[in-house]
Image: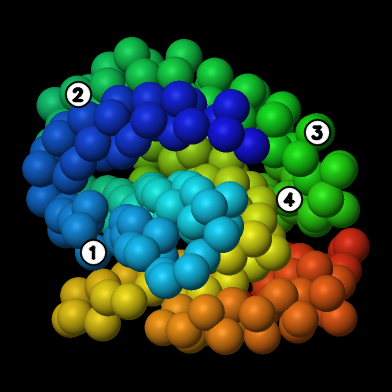
């Protein structure tokens, strides 16, 4: 699992920060997606937490928060007006081409390879295939109003982002199903956190462990059994 950390850091710096936040968001006037509202590394401070659980909670906080940021940024771009100046589309196209190798590497190595072929098989997780994700995007008319090159590129990116989101949801729901401490305005948690346990006391972690042992190893409704409905919210 921890072999994916360098890949997440590259994704974070190049695609999320530079491409989406630094280029596309200001270029198209999209809402800014703040790191501080999505990524939380607080559960490692839970008292009496075993060091491996502490490490897992920190990893899940980083990876799931980054995944939420990525999906939110892509959704903002997919909702952008199609009537943009041609120069903006040209700049966006050049930026997408320059970062495409990094995106493909992350997809092939981390999502489809390390997670999809190795970790998901070992843990019995449901994997979201290209075809399943494409069906969801087509049914939802994702970015349908944008020019064809932008629509195709965004759907490819979103396809990967949806697959990553589901895999990380199942991992976090099995490793550290504990809520974050932060409660301030503006915070955006992953959707699956609504079924997590409180993180204020070590007794709640033990309660979570007992629940996991009795319920297929996860609190995720989408990951409790093979073939789970990937449309479940």
Between disc 3 and disc 2, whose residue precedes? 2
Q: Is residue 106 left or right of residue 210?
A: left
Q: Earlier in the sequence, mark 1 or mark 3?
A: 1
Q: Is residue 94 above or below residue 149?
A: above
Marking on residue 37: 1
Tell which tag, 4 or 3, sits nearer the viewer: 3
Q: On the image, numbered disc 2 is attached to which residue?
A: 91
**175 and 112: which is toward the camera:** 175
Q: Is residue 17 visible?
A: yes
Please identify, in this view, whether the residue under mark 4 or under mark 2 is nearer the observer.
4
* C-alpha span from label 1 to label 4: 27 Å
Residue 72 screen position, x and y as percent: 36, 58
Report x, y in % for residue 132. Answer: 75, 52
Q: Is residue 145 left or right of residue 7?
A: left
Q: Position of residue 7 (x, y in %)?
A: 48, 26
Task: Give the label, 3 or 2, closer to the camera.
Answer: 3
Category of crowding for the residue at label 2, using alpha-carbon neighbours closer than 10 angstroms: few (below 14), some (14–19), many (at least 20)? some
Q: Which mark is residue 117?
A: 3
């Amino acid at each position: 699992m921890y072999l994916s950390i360098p890949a997440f850091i590259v994704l974070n710096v190049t695609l999320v920060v530079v491409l989406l936040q630094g280029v596309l968001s200001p270029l198209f006037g999209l809402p800014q997606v703040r790191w501080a509202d999505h990524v939380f590394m607080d559960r490692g401070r839970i008292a009496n937490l075993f060091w491996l659980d502490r490490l897992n909670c920190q990893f899940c906080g980083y990876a799931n928060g980054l995944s939420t940021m990525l999906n939110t940024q892509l959704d903002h771009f997919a909702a952008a007006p199609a009537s943009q100046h041609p120069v903006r589309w040209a700049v966006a196209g050049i930026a997408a081409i320059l970062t495409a190798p990094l995106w493909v590497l992350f997809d092939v190595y981390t999502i489809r390879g390390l997670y999809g072929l190795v970790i998901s098989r070992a843990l019995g997780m449901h994997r979201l295939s290209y075809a399943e994700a494409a069906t969801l995007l087509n049914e939802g008319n994702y970015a349908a109003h944008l020019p064809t090159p932008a629509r195709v590129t965004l759907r490819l990116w979103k396809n990967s982002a949806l697959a990553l989101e589901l895999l990380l949801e199942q991992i976090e729901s099995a490793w550290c199903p504990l809520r974050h401490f932060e409660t301030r305005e503006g915070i955006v948690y992953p959707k699956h956190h609504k079924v997590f346990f409180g993180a204020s006391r070590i007794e709640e972690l033990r309660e979570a462990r007992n629940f996991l042992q009795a319920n297929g190893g996860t609190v995720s409704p989408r990951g409790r059994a093979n073939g789970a409905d990937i449309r479940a919210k």
